[in-house]
Image (cartoon, grey):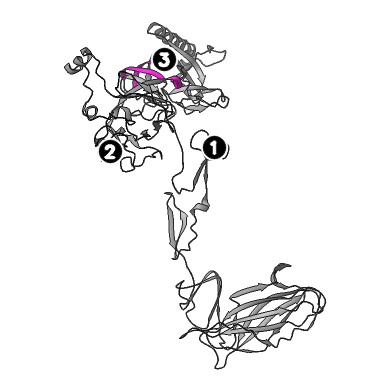
C-alpha cells in the first residue's frame, strides 16, 4: 500500500527534455493511485477494515504494536495495561494507556502510520509478540508497552485474535479492541473447609478446653496457631487454631481475597437440623481472616470447628454420586454433618500477585511506612521513609576495615584505614582529638591516638612540651573570642580550671621538673591580677595501689601581675614543679573574685614543659 494518496499529476512542462523519466512521470502517479484504490477495494471485499490513515504516531511505535491515543501529545503511542488512582473518588480506574484504540498496521514515516482500528488483515507481529506466536486471543501486556501476550494478565484488555500464519512473521488477525472496565471483573468463590483437626486428638471432658495433642501438618484440617506450623506468617495474637491452607490447594490458590475482610463464613454444627449460621468475625467473634490464613479464636468446649463427639470426628462426608451419598438423601431423619463454608467475591485483576495488599517494615528495619496523615499505616496511600539513626550502633567497634563506597553492582566496598597511632619511642609526641587504651579495659596498655592526630618528633628530650589531657572548668567559661577558642576567667566571682598532664615514662632527666606555661590576654586595659597556681601529683601506681592526693600543693610562683592593653597576649612561666616518670600531674589555675581588674582574662594556651 502506498504511503498516502498522491494529490497531483506532474505533467511534462514546456522546455523539459523529453526522456523516459519525464514522459512516464504522469503514468507512474496514475499507477500508484490505481494500486491504492485496488487495496481499498480488496479490504472492503475481503472482510473489511476500519483504519485511521496516515495518523500521527510516536517514533517508537512499530508495526503490529497496540496503541492508544495520547491526548497530551496529540498522537498514537504504545499502549500498556495499567491502573491509576482516581484523585476525585479515591478508587482505581483504567490508566489512559490501557484504552487500546487499535494496532499500527503499516508505518509511513518516523511519525506517521496507518492505525488498524478494527477488522481482518495480515499484520507483521514480530515486534509486538515476544517468542513463538500461536493462534489464539492476545491481550494487552501489563509488563511492557506496545506488547501483546497470549497469557491473560490480571489487568486484561483483549486486543486481537491470531487466526493463522500467512508468511514469515505476518499473520492473519482479527483486530477488535474492547473498551471495557476490567476493574469490574470478579469471581464468586465458595469453599467447604475440613471440619477436623489436622492430626489426632483426645476429646476433652465436658466443660474442658480442646487441645490438638498430635498435630500433623501433612493432613487437611486445623492446626495449633503456632509458628512451627505457620512459618513466616503473621499469626493474630488471639488465634487458637489455624486452617491448614497448604492441604486445601483449591482455596490456597485464590487466597487471600482483596480486601481480606470481605469474606463471610457459615457454620452448620450438624445438630438438631438447625442449619447453618453466620459466624461472627474478629474479637470477640469466632473467626478471623488475614492475608496469611484463616484463624479460629476459641478453644472452649463445643466451640471449635470440628465435632465434639468421637462419632462426628470419625465420620467423613461421602463423595457426591456415591451409593452411600444416595442412601443419606433417602434416609429419614436427614443425615447431619458439620459443615463450615467460607465465601467471597474476588476481583480478577486484584490479586496479591498484581497489587500490593499491605506494606509494613520488618522487625528492626530502618524503613518507616506512614499514611497521608503521617501516622503509621500498612494500606492505602503510603509514604516510605528511611530512619538512618536506627542503623548506628552506640557501641564502638574496633578494627581498621571500613566501608568506603558503593560499587557498580550496588555492593558496599570495604578497605583498610589507619585505626589509630601508638607511640613507638619516647621521642615521639602525639596529640589527637580522641584517645583510648589499646586494651580499653586495661589502663596499663599503650595509648591509641585516633581522629585528627598530630605527630611531633622531640629532638631535645630535656625540653618536652606536654598538652593537657583532661580539663575541668569551675565557673570558668569556654569562649570563642575573635575567632580564637579560649578559657575565660570572669571577674567578680572566683573562677578556676584544672588540667591533668601525663608525665612520660622515659626520656627524662635525672631530676625532672615541670614548668607550667600559660599564654593569656586581658579583654581590657589595666594590670592583670595575681593568679594562683597549685598542683597535685599522683605517682604512677606500678607495683601497689596509690591513694589519690586530696590536697593541693603550692601555690607555685606565677608572676602574672603585669600591665596589659586590651587584647594583647602575654606568655607566663611558673616556677619548676618536681615530678617523676609516669606521674599524673594535676594543675589548677585560679582567679580571685574581686581583684581590681574588671575585665575577663582569656587563656589561650596551657601546657607543661619538662626539664
Q: In the rendered structure, are the residues bearing label 2 and label 1 in contact, judged by CB atoms less than 8 Å apart? A: no
Q: Residue 553: give x, y in percent of width and height.
A: 64, 86
> Which label belongs to residue 176?
3
Secondary structure of the residue carrying numbered label 3: loop
- Which class describes the residues within 10 Å of circle 2: few (<14), some (14-19), or many (20+)? some
Q: Is residue 124 visible?
A: no
Q: Residue 592: give x, y in percent of width and height.
A: 75, 79
**Which quadrant holds the N terminus?**
top left
Q: Is residue 366 above or below residue 404?
A: above
- Which class describes the residues within 10 Å of circle 1: few (<14), some (14-19), or many (20+)? some
The answer to which of 217 and 250 lies nearer the viewer is 217
**Residue at image x 24%, y 18%?**
335
2 vs 1, front mark: 2
Q: Residue 473: give x, y in percent of width and height.
A: 66, 72
Q: What residue did someone put label 1 on?
A: 371
| Quarter assignment of residue 432 | bottom right
Q: Is 267 colored magenta in this rendering?
A: no
The answer to which of 431 and 44 lies nearer the viewer is 431
Q: What residue did someone put label 2 on?
A: 212
| Quarter assignment of residue 256 | top left
Q: Is residue 381 above or below residue 432?
A: above
The reply, left or right, for residue 481 in relation to residue 104 is: right
Q: Is residue 341 above or below residue 465?
A: above
3 vs 2, front mark: 2
**Residue at image x 74%, y 67%?**
482
Q: CA distance from mark 2 to mark 1?
A: 41 Å
Secondary structure of the residue carrying numbered label 2: loop
Secondary structure of the residue carrying numbered label 1: loop
Q: Is 162 colored magenta in this rendering?
A: yes
Magenta stretch bounds: 156-184
Amino acid at each position: 500500500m502506498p504511503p498516502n494518496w498522491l494529490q497531483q499529476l506532474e505533467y511534462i512542462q514546456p522546455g523539459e527534455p523529453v526522456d523516459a523519466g519525464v514522459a512516464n512521470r504522469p503514468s507512474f502517479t496514475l499507477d500508484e493511485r490505481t494500486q491504492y484504490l485496488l487495496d481499498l477495494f480488496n479490504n472492503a471485499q475481503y472482510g473489511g477494515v476500519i483504519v485511521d490513515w496516515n495518523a500521527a504516531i510516536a517514533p517508537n511505535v512499530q508495526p503490529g504494536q497496540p496503541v492508544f491515543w495520547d491526548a497530551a501529545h496529540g498522537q498514537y503511542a504504545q499502549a500498556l495495561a495499567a491502573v491509576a488512582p482516581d484523585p476525585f473518588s479515591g478508587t482505581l480506574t483504567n490508566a489512559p494507556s490501557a484504552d487500546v484504540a487499535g494496532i499500527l498496521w503499516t508505518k509511513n514515516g518516523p511519525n506517521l502510520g496507518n492505525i488498524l482500528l478494527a477488522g481482518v488483515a495480515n499484520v507483521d507481529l514480530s515486534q509486538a509478540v515476544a517468542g513463538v506466536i500461536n493462534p489464539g486471543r492476545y491481550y494487552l501486556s501489563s509488563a511492557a508497552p506496545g506488547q501483546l501476550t497470549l497469557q491473560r494478565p490480571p489487568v486484561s484488555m483483549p486486543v486481537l485474535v491470531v487466526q493463522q500464519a500467512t508468511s514469515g512473521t505476518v499473520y492473519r488477525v482479527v483486530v477488535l479492541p474492547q473498551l471495557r472496565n476490567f476493574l469490574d471483573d470478579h469471581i464468586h468463590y465458595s469453599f467447604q473447609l475440613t471440619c477436623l483437626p489436622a492430626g489426632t486428638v483426645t476429646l476433652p471432658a465436658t466443660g474442658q478446653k480442646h487441645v490438638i495433642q498430635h498435630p500433623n501438618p501433612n493432613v487437611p484440617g486445623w492446626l495449633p496457631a503456632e509458628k512451627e506450623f505457620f512459618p513466616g506468617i503473621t499469626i493474630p495474637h488471639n488465634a487458637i487454631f489455624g486452617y491448614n491452607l497448604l492441604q486445601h490447594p483449591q482455596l490456597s490458590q485464590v487466597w487471600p481475597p482483596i480486601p481480606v475482610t470481605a469474606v463471610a463464613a457459615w457454620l452448620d454444627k450438624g445438630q438438631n437440623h438447625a442449619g447453618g449460621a453466620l459466624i461472627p468475625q474478629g474479637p470477640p467473634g469466632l473467626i478471623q481472616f488475614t492475608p496469611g490464613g484463616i484463624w479460629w479464636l476459641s478453644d472452649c468446649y463445643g466451640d471449635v470447628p470440628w465435632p465434639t463427639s468421637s462419632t462426628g470426628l470419625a465420620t467423613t462426608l461421602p463423595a457426591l454420586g456415591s451409593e452411600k451419598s444416595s442412601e443419606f438423601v433417602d434416609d429419614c431423619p436427614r443425615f447431619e454433618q458439620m459443615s463450615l463454608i467460607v465465601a467471597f467475591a474476588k476481583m480478577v485483576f486484584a490479586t496479591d500477585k498484581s497489587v500490593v495488599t499491605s506494606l509494613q517494615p520488618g522487625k528492626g528495619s530502618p524503613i518507616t511506612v506512614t499514611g497521608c496523615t503521617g501516622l503509621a499505616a500498612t494500606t492505602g496511600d503510603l509514604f516510605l521513609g528511611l530512619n538512618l539513626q536506627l542503623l548506628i550502633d552506640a557501641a564502638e567497634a574496633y578494627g581498621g576495615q571500613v566501608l568506603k563506597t558503593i560499587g557498580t553492582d550496588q555492593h558496599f566496598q570495604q578497605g583498610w584505614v589507619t585505626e589509630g597511632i601508638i607511640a613507638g619511642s619516647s621521642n615521639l609526641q602525639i596529640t589527637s582529638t580522641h584517645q583510648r587504651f589499646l586494651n580499653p579495659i586495661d589502663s596499663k596498655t599503650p595509648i591509641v591516638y585516633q581522629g585528627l592526630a598530630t605527630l611531633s618528633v622531640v629532638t631535645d628530650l630535656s625540653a618536652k612540651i606536654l598538652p593537657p589531657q583532661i580539663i575541668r572548668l569551675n565557673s570558668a567559661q569556654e569562649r570563642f573570642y575573635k575567632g580564637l577558642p579560649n578559657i575565660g576567667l570572669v571577674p567578680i566571682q572566683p573562677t578556676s580550671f584544672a588540667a591533668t598532664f601525663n608525665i612520660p615514662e622515659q626520656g627524662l632527666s635525672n631530676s625532672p621538673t615541670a614548668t607550667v606555661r600559660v599564654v593569656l590576654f586581658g579583654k581590657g586595659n589595666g594590670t592583670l591580677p595575681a593568679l594562683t597556681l597549685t598542683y597535685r601529683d599522683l605517682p604512677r601506681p606500678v607495683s601497689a595501689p596509690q591513694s589519690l592526693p586530696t590536697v593541693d600543693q603550692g601555690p607555685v610562683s606565677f608572676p602574672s601581675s603585669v600591665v596589659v592593653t586590651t587584647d594583647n597576649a602575654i606568655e607566663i612561666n611558673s616556677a619548676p614543679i618536681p615530678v617523676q616518670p609516669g606521674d599524673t600531674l594535676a594543675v589548677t589555675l585560679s582567679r580571685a573574685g574581686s581583684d581590681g581588674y574588671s575585665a575577663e582574662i582569656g587563656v589561650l594556651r596551657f601546657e607543661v614543659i619538662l626539664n
